[in-house]
Image (cartoon, rainbow, N blue to C red):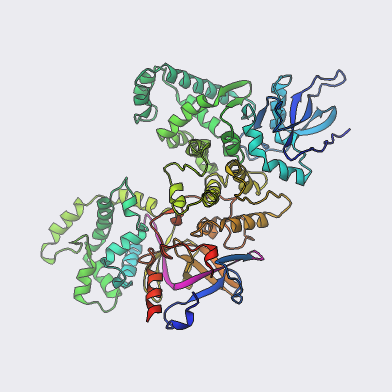
Amino acid sequence: MQHSYQPLPGPRSIRLLSFGPGTSSSDLICVQLNIVDLDSECLPGYWGLSYTWGNPLPSPFSPPTRHEILCDGKSFLVGSNLYDFLKRFNGSRRCFWIDAICINQNDISERNAQVSIMVWIYSKAEGTFIWLGESDNTSIRSLDLLVKFAEAKKRLGEDRDKILRKRWEFNDVGFYAAMGMEPWSQEDWKALLDFYTRSWFRRQWVMQEVLANDQAVVFCGGQGIAWPHFMDLTQFIIGQRWGWELISLESRFHKAGSPLGIESTYHFIGLLDRKNQGPTKPSTDILLGILSDYGTYSQRFDAFVLYTVYRLGGREATDPADHVYAPLSLASKFKREEDSLPKVDYGLSVIQIYTDFSYHLMRVPRPMVLAFREDDTTRKLTELPSWVPDYSVRYSGTPLSMRKAYMASGKHIMWPDDGG
Amino acid sequence: MTVGSKLSPSIPSWNNFLLRTVEADVYPDLYVVHQNRLHMKGIRIDSIREIIELQPNATAAALFDLLRIAFHHDWSLTSQPPLESLVRTICADLIEKQISFGVENIFSWFASWFCLISRNPTQLSRFRESLGQVEAQDWDKFWILRGKSLLPKPDNQNAAFAEAETWPNSPKFEDSLSSFIMGRRYLALTSTRQALALTPLSAKPGDEIWVLFNGRTPYVLCKKEQGYYFVGESYLHSFMHGELSQETRRRELI
């Protein structure tokens, strides 16, 4: 018998997954769904799962295999990566929220509604559970290294900041000595490179899934590490600009032209300090350049939405609509009653979603949206109106319009109600 | 704001235009989207006459192309010497912002680049011929960058070569150039005003440069039968700080 969903009773109702007792008649993994309300006082503890729907490794050849599980006693099909997760944690007493199972993916209006509250689903959870996929030799080695580095960092005394902030040559022996670690081999670094190229790092949704909650754990197979410790080494490598040294260890990544996980991770860090501030307190980067023109929170909110899409957009997504909807979901956390955001509607065409979104953001003065319109040579969706940026392409560089110094149309901004 | 008729024909007038279709002036707002077409107001500054690609590893011929465009642009648009305008255009005038390089470094890299080619007497005279009629004083003025002439003194060729050796070497310059131009862009010369511009890769001669209401930068638009096709943002040297709207306002008062 095929599984069928019970409708969700309220706009902030969600389904939570727990592992059920297996039936004696089958070896299939059994899960059950319970409907709860996000605002209920007795909301049970649960973890929001962050994972990739496709192949967790950057292999271009991944036949979509589906595996059968039992959901509420009925047959249900899941992708391989999710199946690996369920197999690994089968029997766990934790509850999870997993988009592929907890949202009825065939019901567009339910999907629209759930995506609109996605940021709340992740932020009300106990934490975000990051599943990078089943382990392999390189991931086991990498997690060991991540733990080693975090432990070494903890052991450092007063000169911790001095040692970590100093600019080291890649693989400098002095660096290992200062950290009190055995030197790492070429194979160690190659393993890390492989690890950072896992698909998860490039997915569109993961940004808001991690940024929505302060707590996160990273799991690869049965090994796990807390997010702050995962970030210890990651942040260090980025701070030292060792990313390119890493890439040069393995020329095949040049050929594949695949963006490295470590670069994608870099964009997390830029946002981490801003995650609970939203449009009110911009940190000292280019966002200030946009925000300087605005007085009210609503105006700043519009600019913040545009900025979020600029910084988070163009990553990997199964549905091109998510290049807009995933960043919007993060921004919605800072939305007040009087601010407006375009409605999530997966029923519309991508062209319409991108166009409506751009029109909405024409409210940001100094037609900033137009500045993100990339060159024709990099556009993928050719049917888009020419003035609409292609959000499925990552904008590289900084638009000239982000520079405060330019005011080609004059210093004074005209607002729509000034008349024509 | 509708002052078009009061302006002389050579001055672009405030226009309503659509980025896909031209329709009557029915939209009172600054911008409206109707059937996925954006309707907004703006002013046409100029069109693109000539365009050349900026390449970090440019050949001598391409460098002379740059210099030729710099020579032919309207020097009087700014109070800067022509080569300085060229350097500032290539960097989108973000020279002061490139903290890691420093203003003097940028100019000396460019100077060494121009210098190296001006030290070749044959190439130099061929270049001068290609410019057509050139006044001697314009020629001398053209080669001044940061108060220093890049032309070799005729009586002391060897010393001039020795001096060129002391400029920072060009490979480093090529590295920094690719970071200045922030992705591949074109250097363009405009038709009427003969201003220098940076345009997106897909711009082509004949495309128009517009300032749209509230826009921080001018935009390149391509006129098509059904309306305007949006090409991308651009940098137009000496029109980045509202010079155009001041100009229009001044005209209006007459």
Quadrant (top left, top right, bottom left, bottom right) of the N terminus of chain A:
top right
Instruction: Between residue A260 and residue A42, name the one nearer to us.
Output: A42
Specify start and end residues of the magenta stretch as a single range.
Answer: B34-58
Q: Is residue A305 left or right of residue B141?
A: right
- Quick check: is B38 in the magenta stretch? yes
Q: Residue at x 63, y 40 (%)?
A: A60
Q: Residue B177 placed where, x, y %?
A: 35, 53
Q: Quadrant of residue B158?
A: bottom left
Q: Is residue A129 left or right of residue A420?
A: right
Instruction: Between residue B180 and residue A156, name the one nearer to us.
Output: A156
Residue A65 makes an appearance in the image: no
Q: Main secondary structure of the magenta part?
A: strand
Q: Quadrant of residue B196?
A: bottom left
- Quick check: is B224 in the magenta stretch? no
Q: Residue at x 74, y 40 (%)?
A: A11
Residue furthest to the left: B155
Q: Residue A118 placed where, x, y %?
A: 66, 39
Q: Residue A120 placed where, x, y %?
A: 64, 36
Q: Residue B206 placed where, x, y %?
A: 48, 73
- Residue B218's place in the image compared with A257, above or below, is below
- Residue A384's place in the image compared with B100, above or below, is below
